[in-house]
Amino acid sequence: MDLGLKGKTALITAASKGIGKAVAESLAAEGCEIAICSRTKDDLISAANEIKEKYKTEPFWCVCDLNKEKDIELAVEVVNKQFGKIDILVNNCGGPIPGYLRDLNFKDWTSAFEQVLMSVVKFSSLIVPEMILREWGRIINITSVSVKQPIDNLMLSNSLRSGVIGFAKTLSNEVAKFNITVNNIAPGYTLTNRLYDLAVHRAKVSGISHEEILSDMSKAIPMNRLGRPEEIASAVSFLASQQASYITGNTLVIDGGFVKGL
């Protein structure tokens, strides 16, 4: 299926590893011009080189700390300077630290608020006006299955990723008349560094190995396995496509059947 994305420009945040990188690869395979950002220059260079080798297109990259407003402003500025437009915005970020309420201080909350929710608000606020002028755009937020079924010990993620969902739904109604869609992807347990780190953290708390933790996660999923980043990325590419032009304000859960609600 031709997704109609050739020549579109996509900016993917936190895209040097994991799901963000997989999204960049998927969109590059569809013929998009790719811009990626993250906090770590070396990881960005490595990711850009891999994408260039696989898809014969050279991604543009820039360092951006999602907790810093000036970094976000600069990222949007340099990507617009490089490509002249941003058609597709994929808001992705690493997960905030795990913990129960008693484990977290106000600094933890402030940092997670900036990283998870306000980065989405800031990038969207800077890019949406130009999308409105062109009367076309796609905004896709990578959240978590926790927006549908909260996960124990992830107080920050459960709270603030749900805020992203509320923001996205409200924005989708505001910009729909300009052919701009706003949707969310809610991945379940997916094989990334973040999941590994969570397993290590749980292992320390529970006293069992992280391998056992990962095995238990798999057993809790009807498909009896963890997700792969490329499976999340394929859904992002579809939501960015011309074929998905009538889908907006939705949250697509990709979890192998983990969520038990209707």
Image (cartoon, rainbow, N blue to C red):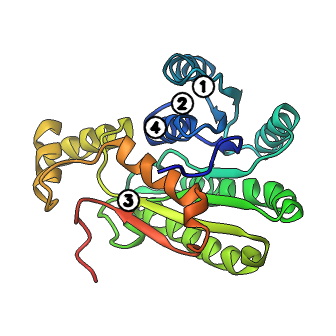
Residue located 38% across and 41% down the image = 230
Query: Callout 2: few (<14), some (14-19), or many (20+) C-alpha neighbours within 10 Å?
Result: many
Query: Circle 3 sits on which residue?
Result: 154
Q: Earlier in the sequence, mark 3 or mark 1?
A: 1
Q: Earlier in the sequence, mark 2 or mark 3?
A: 2
Residue located 82% across and 65% down the image = 135
Q: Earlier in the sequence, mark 2 or mark 4?
A: 2
Which one is in front in this view, the residue at disc 1 or the one at disc 4?
4
Query: Callout 3: few (<14), some (14-19), or many (20+) C-alpha neighbours within 10 Å?
Result: some
**Amino acid at the residue labelled 2:** Ser
Q: In this image, 80 relative to 11: left or right?
A: right
- Disc 2/disc 1 C-alpha distance (Å): 8 Å
Which one is in front in this view, the residue at disc 2 or the one at disc 3?
2
* Residue 110 numbered mark, or none: none
Image coords of residue 125 (percent x, y): 80, 60
Query: Circle 4 sits on which residue?
Result: 22
Give the structural element (helix, strand or loop) at label 1.
loop
Query: Circle 1 sits on which residue?
Result: 40
Height in image: 89 above or below 170? Answer: above
Q: Earlier in the sequence, mark 1 or mark 4?
A: 4
Residues tagged 3 and 1 counted as in contact (Cβ below 8 A): no
Residues tagged 1 and 4 counted as in contact (Cβ below 8 A): no
Q: In this image, 213 relative to 135: left or right?
A: left
- Disc 3/disc 1 C-alpha distance (Å): 25 Å
Give the structural element (helix, strand or loop) at label 2.
loop
Q: Earlier in the sequence, mark 4 or mark 3?
A: 4
Which one is in front in this view, the residue at disc 3 or the one at disc 1?
1
- Disc 4/disc 3 C-alpha distance (Å): 24 Å
Q: In this image, 197 relative to 11: left or right?
A: left
Give the structural element (helix, strand or loop) at label 4.
helix
Image coords of residue 47 (percent x, y): 53, 23
